[in-house]
Image (cartoon, grey):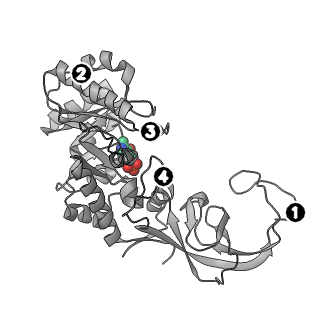
Amino acid sequence: MYPRLLIDRAKFRDNVSFIKKKLEQAGIDTVVVTKVFRAMPELMDILHEVGIRSVADSRIENLARIGPEFKKLLLRLPMLSEADRVVQYSDMALVSELEQVIALDRAAKRQQKAYGLILMIDLGDLREGVLVRDWPSFFPQLPKLKQAEWLGTGVNLTCYGGILPTVENLQQLIDAQKQWAEYLGQGLPLISGGNSSSLYLLDQQQMPPEINSLRIGEAIVLGRESAFGQDIPGMHRDVFRLEAELIEVKTKPSLPWGKLGLDAFGHVPTHQDQGPMRRGILAIGKQDIYDEYLQPRAAIKVIGASSDHTIVDLKQLPLKLGDIVSFDLTYGGLLQLMTSDYVHKVLI
Ligand SMILES: *Cc1c(COP(=O)(O)O)cnc(C)c1O
């Protein structure tokens, strides 16, 4: 059945082992981020076999399906309205607000459950976290915990603002943690130094030794680091591959004719006359994946899409009706495909 997303278990396993080994050599614990593959049970089994013990996800629905063989971290700041469910289905959370801390501590108390908290610090990417310049006045306001416990601090970079982790900004995180630990008069075991965009610091031998945990998603699923978008030598780029079927193949003009109005998404399209073109229509559309995320493996070109159709320029390739076309994927594309019920997930 098409469209389908092929998932290569052996390649996934290789990628997980590769990252785990690389981080281990630097004294860093690998927390595998499962959100892009929605904590698919068959892939969770592989994580466990490879020796991964901590996983993280942004959705409590995914964490709820993961068994107790993993320590589970909630990545997205918890909603106040879901504090009880968060504590029930995870073992630790990233937090940045006083009320969040209080709500989770109370929920942990009610459930008599050990629960860990990691305070996020914003080092310039401007997504979640206490601004680093507000830190000295922020941490003394934190309540005394009754049940939950502080694990340490964390940062997320290269997500919203595109700001890279560097020796300088990670040092600010380390300094913040030291300052706080001294104030508390207790050790804080964990410094979570970011995501797949922090990997390049390891390759350049610049990762500060205090960083002892990273949360890795993209590098494992796509074999790419996310600071500069470079493929990682020794990793597989094609754990996931999309296949879609041609439902029309015809030579047509490349320039639409008639009076120009709006396209299916309310935009006024622009077109170039490239003469007659062998065009194919694939049975997949923006409801499954935005066309800009599709990277054809053959020498064809994606030229546009509506909700359920994707139009391709077949160029010189002898493709015919019913043939299957394959694509490599970007992060955004994979996220969308995993979330579409219309795309069949096939493990190979
Ligand atoms: C998604 C996410 C990650 C994983 O990022 P990758 O670039 O996929 O490695 C890490 N931390 C947080 C807070 C996230 O939301």
Tell me which amino acid carries mark 2.
Gln
Q: Is mark 2 within 8 Å of ligand 1?
A: no
- Identify the secondary structure beneath mark 2: helix
Going from N to C along the chain, the mark reached first, 3 or 4, is 3
Q: Is mark 3 within 8 Å of ligand 1?
A: no
Going from N to C along the chain, the mark reached first, 1 or 4, is 4
Identity of the residue drawn at 56% across and 63% down: 294
Tell me which amino acid carries mark 1.
Gly
Q: Is residue 2 left or right of residue 95?
A: right
Residue at the right extreme of this rendering: 258
Residue bearing the label numbered 2 = 179
Name the mark nearer the viewer: 1 or 3: 3
Tell me which amino acid carries mark 3.
Leu
Picture quarter containing residue 322? bottom right
Few, some or many residues within 10 Å of mark 3 (<14, 14–19, 20+): many
Q: Is residue 294 left or right of residue 46?
A: right
Q: Give x and y (percent) for residue 303.
A: 68, 64
Report if the CB atoms under discs 2 and 1 are less than 8 Å apart: no
Tell me which amino acid carries mark 4.
Gly
Report if the CB atoms under discs 2 and 3 are less than 8 Å apart: no
Relative to the observer, which residue lies in front, 224 or 8?
224
Identity of the residue drawn at 77% across and 51% down: 268
Identity of the residue drawn at 68% across and 78% down: 248
- Where 257 sits versus 246, above or below? above
Few, some or many residues within 10 Å of mark 2 (<14, 14–19, 20+): some
Query: How far is disc 2 from disc 3 in space, using C-alphas?
Result: 23 Å
Kindly identify which numbered label has been placed on residue 229.
Answer: 4
Residue bearing the label numbered 1 = 258
Picture quarter containing residue 276? bottom right
Identity of the residue drawn at 17% across and 33% down: 148
Residue bearing the label numbered 3 = 164
